[in-house]
Image: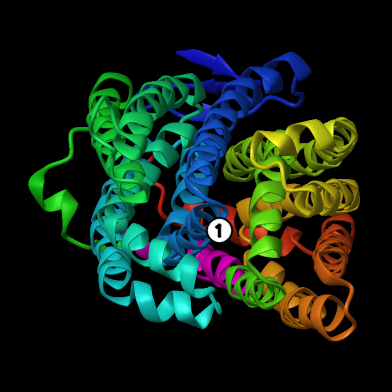
Amino acid sequence: MRRYAGLHVCLRGGAVSAPRAFKAADIRALVLPLFIELSLGMLVGLAGTTLASRISDAAGGGFALANHLFGLLFMIFRLVGAGVSVVITQNLGAGHRDEADRVARAALASGTWMGGLAALLAAVGALPLLKLLNAPPDVLELAAPFLQCLALALLLDAWNACMAGVMRAHLRNRDTLQVMVVMHFTHLALAWPLMHGWGDWSGWGLPGFALAVIVSRVVGMALHLWLWRLRLGLRPAWADWWRVRRAQLVPVLHIGLPGAAENLAWELAFMVSVAAVGVLGTQALATQTYVLQFNMWILISGMAIGITVEMVVGHLIGARQLRQAHDLVRKAQTIGLGVTLLVACVMALAGPWLLRLFTQDPHILQEGSRLLWLSILLETGRTFNLIVIGALRATGDSRYPFYAGAGSMAVVLAGGSWLLGVHWGWGLAGVWMAYAADEWIRGLLMWRRWLTQGWMPYARKTHARMRAQAPAGH
């Protein structure tokens, strides 16, 4: 038995019970590995952008566009991925370890089919998808083959995300961190020589980065499979990789479909805003690419807290500790906003020096510095939104975030980017203002939902489902 975040976790066959209070030190024990893991992911993205920008600004823009589409296509897997961890934590909280394992196995098959579909779309649809984003010709020429080379990585990432999500649901954050350290180290070690060459060989440019991604994901899969056996006692059979289990997927889709719809709506709205930036020119696209790298560094502390809160709230809902879940989210919001505000201010102050890592263009340096100051407003709103949406999803209240937020994404995020940035001539600053307004509007709607306890009926329904599926005599 191992203790995490105030939860007593039986590794096999036992119940998970939640006491009445959490210790801050225990929560930090879960947040810190996840924070480091997310930081490593951002480091790889930063390194990739740096390596691409050393080829040319067009390569930097192409790298960003292809990765945006990669994320959009990955939303296909999110149909189930968004719900797998939540349903597993709820089952563990209720003491239903066997059902949690069945959900984990069902997720593997879903990863195969949906990750495979995303890979196929990337391979055959790269060029038309990039044209929809108004990619400039010099960017399009580099981004299309890069996205096609990343197709296989979509399938591998679906499997890795599934296995890592199961590990986190069991509160095995340190183990997932170890996998990510090895995986990202492999990626970085291969990326430089494959992109820029070695000796007399000139390298493959952006496709070389894609090959490094694929190799590192294969390494990650091998490590995840080993940890599933060692830590969780899970040994996937051949059928687990392709056979869809309806009984386990129904509650997963109840969480995952609205969650994926929300993410897809945001990605589509963001793509519309990227198209607006594309109209502003290659220089504007490169500026946004570089600033977004730093924004992700601002966001990771809030992301780590948000994901941890989602996992712990899922356990608490399964154990019917509703009051404790309510109090936990209120505390997490205060911490998340404070940390994000501090990091965003530091990043804005250091902006003029940080941007020189990517470019020496004076216009990009000036515009990028202004965007980093606007990011203080944007990223505090995003963290505020992120934490409470994860908590709502963990209670079973997964539809409200989509229904309440879709209008803001379409009108404020997408429409506002074109109105302020292009039609009113405010440029990138106008696009950033639309981003910030959208995050705060949605965040305040979600926070009102949490404070008024509109999620409580869904939490009770979730616990009723846990009781209904309990084995006889449990």
Q: Is residue 321 above or below residue 151?
A: above
Q: Residue at point 87% right, 39% down?
A: 337
59 vs 321, nearest the viewer: 59
Q: Is residue 385 visible?
A: yes
| 218 sits left or right of 188 in the view | left
Q: Residue at point 79% right, 31% down?
A: 353
List the residue tagged with mark 1.
61
The quadrant in which residue 266 appears is bottom right
Q: Is residue 136 magenta?
A: no
34 vs 416, nearest the viewer: 416
Residue 365: % across, % down? 79, 46
| 424 sits left or right of 259 in the view | right
Residue 190: % across, % down? 31, 29
Query: What's the magenta region?
Result: 248-265
Count of marks overlaid on the render: 1
Amino acid at circle 1: Gly
Q: Residue at point 40% right, 37% down?
A: 164
Residue 54: % across, % down? 52, 41
In which quadrant of the rendered image does the C terminus lie?
Answer: top left
Q: Residue at point 80% right, 81% down?
A: 422
| Residue reaching furthest to the bottom | 423
Colour scheme in use: rainbow
User: Helix, strand, or loop for circle 1?
Assistant: helix
258 vs 66, nearest the viewer: 66
Q: Is residue 255 magenta?
A: yes
Q: Is residue 430 above or below residue 388?
A: below
Q: Main secondary structure of the magenta part?
A: helix
| Residue reaching furthest to the left | 238
Residue 46: % across, % down? 57, 37
